[in-house]
Image (cartoon, rainbow, N blue to C red):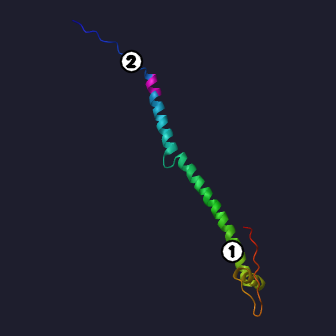
Amino acid sequence: MSVKRKPTKNLNPKLIRVGIGLIVFVLILFVFVSGPRGTWQLYRTDREKQKLVDEIRELEFKKAELDSERTRLLNDPEYIEKIAREKYNMKKEGEKVSKIEKETDN
């Protein structure tokens, strides 16, 4: 009695190499895109850096405005008087202040 064996199909070695190469390529691509220094992380870091640079510019502009305001408050008595009258409703001695209210349409 003889047992017949099915003929085995040999995988093409070239096909195996291509498959392994494709798997390695996909793994390397995944590491470069999603790793700690991957493309996605670099993109997010660059966006965050740009936001911080914009915030620094805004703060520098605001600082320049505040420095200008400080200089005026230290050196310009007329400006100090204007601020005192408008913002703090102050008046000079003997001066009467009248408050005018605007009509509101209800």
| Element type where label 2 sits in the image | loop
Horizontal placement of 9 versus 99: left or right? left
Figure check: 17 above or below 5: below
Looking at the image, which residue sits at the far front?
106
| Element type where label 1 sits in the image | helix
The foreground one among 91 and 53 is: 91
Q: Residues within 10 Å of mark 1 (few under 14, many from 20)?
A: few
Labelled disc at residue 17: none
Residue occupying image coordinates x 75% and y 77%: 101
The location of residue 4, given as percent across then percent down, is 28, 9
The foreground one among 18 and 91 is: 91
Label 1, label 2: how far apart the Cα atoms are? 81 Å
Q: Mark 1 or 2, which is nearer the eye?
A: 1
| Disc 1: which residue | 66
**Do residues under tags 1 and 2 come within 8 Å of each other at their CB atoms?**
no
Labelled disc at residue 10: 2
Q: Which residues are magenta?
A: 14-18
The location of residue 89, given as percent across then percent down, is 71, 83
The foreground one among 24 and 48 is: 48
Residue occupying image coordinates x 46% and y 33%: 23
Horizontal placement of 26 versus 6: left or right? right
Which of the image's four quarters has the C terminus? bottom right
The location of residue 103, given as percent across then percent down, is 76, 73
Which of the image's four quarters has the N terminus? top left
